[in-house]
Image (spheres, grey):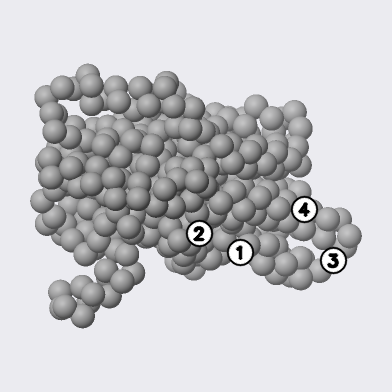
Amino acid sequence: MSVQQSGLLERLGIPRPLIFGFIGLTIFMIGDGVETNILEPFLSSEHGFSVSLAGTLVTVYGVAVAIAAFFAAALSDLWGPRKVMILGASIWIVFELIFLTVALTTDHTWLIFLAYGLRGFGYPFFAYGFLVWITATASPKQLGTGVGWFYVAFSAGLPTLGALVATISMQYVNLTFYETLWVSLVLVVIGSLIALLGVKERRGRHPLVANPDDVKQTLGQGFKLLRNDRRARFVTYIRTINSIPTYAMAVFFPSFFTDDLKWQLSWFLILTTVIYAVNLPFNPFFGSFGDRHGWARTVFWGGSIGGAVTLALVYFIPMFGVQAGMSNGVVFGITIAAGALFGVSLAGFVPLSAIAVSLDPKHPGAAMATYNLGVGGAVAVGPLLVAVFHPLIGPTGLILVMIALYLLSGWMTLQLRGTQPGFDGVPALAEDAHIEDLADVNANA
C-alpha cells in the first residue's frame, strides 16, 4: 500500500493494518444479511410457518447471538480476536450446511430450530471479534471514528447489500428462496477467507490481557462490570433498543407490506436497502461528531429522539397514505424518504461503543462485552416482541412499543453523561490517562 493510501486511511480513521478485515467483514455480513428479510416469507410459503412461529425461530437464533456477542469480546481478550473470528466463521458455515442440506430438506421443525439456532453463534464471534481487534488497534483519539467504520462494513452487509443481493437473486436472476440461501453461504466463505488471510496485524493474533491464563477472571470481567456499574447495564439496554426495529421489522414488515398494504415484497427489500445504505456514511460521521461534540449528547438527539420520530414516519406514512387512497407509487416514494431519515437516526447510536470502552479501558474486551450483549439481545428481543405481541396488538401496537422503547433509551442515555473526557464536567486531562490505560493494554498484548 502506498504512503498516499496509508495517509488517506489514517485521515479517515480506518486502522490501516485492518483494511482487509473491513473488506472481508462486509462480504461476510452481505452473506449473513441475504436471508434476513426473506426467511419469514420463505418459511411461511414453503414450510408452513406462521409469523409468530417464524418470530420464535429468530428469537431462538437471537438468544444464541446474544450469548456469542457477549463472550466474543471476553474470548478475544483471552485468545486474541483472530482465533475468535475463525471460530465464528467455522460455526456459521458448518451449521448453515446442516440447515440447508438436512433441516430444510427433511422439513422437521425441531431440526430447523436446532440448526438455525446453533448457527446464531457464528456471526457474532466473527464480527464482534473483529470489533475488539479495532478497539485494540485504533488510535484512542479516533476510537469513535474507527468503530463507525466497523458499522459501515457491518451494516453494508446486514441488511443493506444483503437485501439488495436477495432482491437481485430472486427478481432478476430468478433464483428460488432456497437457492438464494446457498448464495449467502458462498458469500460468507469468501468474506471469511479475505479477512482471515488478508489481515497480517500481529496484536490480534495474541491475547489482549496481561494474564490470559486466568480464564475465570477474564471471562468474568464483563459480568462484574454489569453487576457493579449501572452505566454498563444502560449501555446494554440502549444498544438492544437501538436494533430492535431492525430484527422485528424483518419478521412482521413483509406481511405488513404484502397483506395490509397490498404491496409487493420487493418493495420492502428496497426500503430495507435504502434505510441501511443511507445509514452507512452516517456511521463514521456520527462517530467523529460524537468524538468532537459529546458521545452521550449525540446518542440522545441523533439516536433516541431521532429514532422515535423517524420510525413513526416509516410506519404511519404508508398506512395512512394507503387508507387515504393515495397513489401507491407516491406513498412508497415518501416512505422511502422516511426510511432514509430512519437510517440516519440509527447511526446516531454509534458513539455508544466508545462510551462502553470508557467504562473499563483496562479491559476493552470486557467493556465491549456489555455493548455486544445489547447487540445480540436485539436479535432475540425484536423477534420475541413480534412472537408475543403481533397476535395481540398487531403491527401498529408493535410500532408504538418500539417508539416508547426509543424514548426510554433517551432517558438512559442522559445518565451516561460524564463518560467522555472534556465533556459534562470531566476534566480534559482525563483523556491522557485514558490513552495511557489503552496503551498499557496494547503493550501487554
Which residue in the structure is indicated by mark 4?
A: 316
Q: In the picture, which quadrant includes the C terminus?
A: top left
**Left or right: 82, with 40 as reference point:** left
Front residue of 129/424: it is 424
Label 3 vs label 4, nearer the camera = 4
Front residue of 433/100: it is 433
Judged from the image, the secondary structure of the residue bearing numbered disc 2 is: helix
* Above or below, 377 relative to 355: above
Precedes in sequence: disc 3 or disc 4: 4
Front residue of 31/224: it is 224
Graded by Cα atoms within 10 Å as few (under 14), some (14 to 19) or many (20 or more), the crowding at tag 4 reads: some
Which residue in the structure is indicated by mark 1?
A: 340
Precedes in sequence: disc 2 or disc 4: 2
Q: Which mark is residue 293?
A: 2
Residue 42 visible? The answer is no
What's the CA distance linking mark 4 and mark 1?
Answer: 15 Å
Judged from the image, the secondary structure of the residue bearing numbered disc 3 is: loop
| Image location (x, y in percent) of residue 433 | 28, 45
**Amino acid type, mark 3:** Met
**Amino acid type, mark 1:** Ala
What's the CA distance linking mark 2 and mark 4?
Answer: 32 Å
| Image location (x, y in percent) of residue 65 | 40, 34
Task: Choose top left, top right, bottom left or bottom right for residue 206.
Answer: top left
Label 2 vs label 4, nearer the camera = 2
At 76% across and 70% down in the image, what residue appears?
330
